[in-house]
Amino acid sequence: MICWNSKFDSYVKTLKDGNERIIAVEINSSPKRICLINCYLPTSGYSDTAVKYQDNLDLLEIIIQKYCESHQIILVGDMNATMLLSRRNDSDRRFRSFIDKHKLGTLANMGTAPTYQHGKGSSQIDYIFSHTVDNLLELEICHQHPTNTSSHVPVVGKIKATLSLTCAKSIKPPERRRNLWKDCDIEAYQSTLSNSQIPIIERPDQIKTFIDQLNGNILAAAKIAVPSKKIRLKGPKWKASPALRQLLVKGNLIHKNWIQYGRPTVNHPIIEERRSIKRRIRSQQRQDMACERKQFYNQIVESGKSTNFYKLIRRGLSNTISKPQGFMNEGQLILDLDKQSKGFARFYEDLAVPKQLEQFDSDYHENTQFNLELIRKIVLENKDTFSPITPDEVKSAIYKLNNNKSSDEYGICAEHLKLASSTIFNVLSVLFNAIIEHCYIPLQFLSGIITPVHKKGKDATDFGSYRGITVSYTIGKVFEHVILDRIEDRLPLDQSSLQFGFTKHISILLAALLINECIVEAKEFNLPLFIAFLDSQRAFDVVDHPSLKCKLFLNGICCKIWNVIDTWYTNLTSRVKWCGRLSDNFPIKQGVRQGGILSTGLYKTYINDLLKTLERNRLGMHIGTTYIGCPTVADDIALVANSATDLQLMLNVANSYAKP
């Protein structure tokens, strides 16, 4: 962490370079700007320490080489290695070689004083280095303060620099604020929005213009009626218990005695007293934390409030760093965050383009394309009337959005719409009807931001180990809900009774129950039992758009809605957000968005033919006359049979559906 007084904000700019262990800022000084790098290098004692330590040194080298010509380099932090020749482990050798290579130095008066106490020993591992040692005016290793229970002591340095505004003024990032919806002045909010005029949309190009105006009106109303507070990093709300306060007072007294004895380091009784009181302070801190946890658990049991239960879940979430230091791509380690973001974008863009692999069924593909063009002609010639979307449908769709979710890229969230007056329902109904009538999907609806989420147990340095969750436009989600309500009874029209995923009022546990019943049946009647579990690789990401559109039409979806979905999924785009970096847009030519409202219904329609084929051919196990051969949860299918032949036939059918 690098902190500075807010009055210096115009002189300091955070640099994009670094990772979770290395951060850097630029200080606008003259005659030369300063690049201040703070790092916490990996500690020794682990099997992968050497690799991680070298990775961080490589990243430091990249930063130093990038700024050394134009800036004065100052490197500070916990190096977890020493410059003293008395210690010579692998990290020490690597670190000393790195410092020598880049001609970094520190003041001679630093001496050999330790900065870290560990057990009965000590070491010097915290440093301040600079390319120009003359600019380091002072350097001091502080003494251990009695209230400092850390094993480290501060290292204080002073540098000579003249701040200058002649250099490029730093661009402050936009202040992050959180709306306090509980304190919203609903009357003022609705009154402001009620001034929004119901639009008259006669041409497709008016749709995008109106959406921009609507976004502005919603945000302006929220600014007037909804208080907000700045999002700040908060430390733990910790308060010392009476027992701990007594120990701290005693530790203070022992520390003063240690100073009076001349700060001895060996062969003195006061040294053991200091170690003992520090151990007792740490022990009391752990006891206080255990007591606080126990009180919290009792509070959950006694109160029965769900809010306390969710607090417990959040406490149990892992606090470990999920983002790796770098990613491997074609044998190269990528450490730069901008390059990582571009790497993710290339990965998801490649995933969104259909591939003609060895098992590619070109005949099926050509037939599907022919059918799709034929369907488009039928839809264009269709003269069926469309029942307009009503304000009540919009209201129902809005209230299906989840609260307390992040805002979209335009700053709008569910609460903006839920607390709006009835005017917004009328406005959106007119907007949605215009979209369907003109079959024009605005850019805001087409674009989505993909956030890579690491899959548990997968290699964190591989782009393919991250699931892409898409955040889309909030008003676009309302439109998806309205469309889904209109077509839900036809997604799919004849759904397999063995599909337990994404199905209302049906628990996915029923799939496990059926498999358990199969096991019981096989044991009771002494029957052989064969089970194969299929998990489609990146199932949502590789849905074939032409096949999906044909299946939707055959399910009897209204022609105007089908035309909207066809246009929508022909022009989809996405971009990747990674560590605050946004990639460029890229087209989505296959797949349904993970996190999309329509995606679950569309995927069920896409996979339903496979389940119905197995059922029609009676392939797999029966209990009595009831077919239960393929219990399914979304894209996870269990093939259950009483013979190896039946199971192989089922696998053959599944394989034929897996061909692009």
Image (cartoon, grey):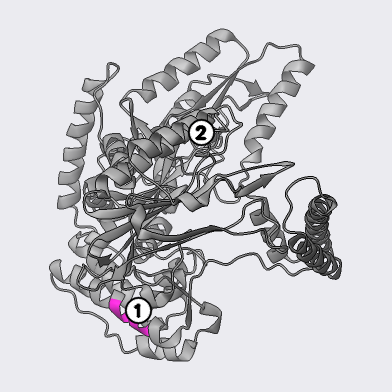
Q: Position of residue 251 (x, y in %)?
A: 80, 63
Near-viewer residue (213 or 32): 32
Q: Which residue is nearer to you in this view: 595 or 547?
A: 595
Mark 2 or mark 1: whose residue is earlier in sequence: 2
Q: Quadrant of residue 457?
A: top right
Give the x, y percent position of residue 226: 46, 83
Q: What is the three-letter code of the residue carrying label 1? A: Ile
Q: Residues within 10 Å of mark 1 (few under 14, many from 20)?
A: many
Instruction: Say how many tags the image has.
Output: 2
Residue denoted by label 2: 92
Q: Main secondary structure of the magenta part?
A: helix
218 within the magenta span = yes
- 86 vs 176, left or right, is right
Picture coordinates of residue 549 (x, y %)?
Answer: 29, 42
- Say which element carries label 1: helix
Q: Please, what secondary structure does the residue beneath circle 2 have?
A: helix
Residue 385 shows up from this direction:
no
Q: Can residue 266 be seen by looking at this rendering?
A: yes
Q: Please report the residue visible at 37 percent of the width from the left and 40 percent of the height from the top.
A: 59
Q: Is residue 619 left or right of residue 96?
A: right
Task: Read off the residue under disc 1.
Answer: 218
Span of residues in magenta: 216-221
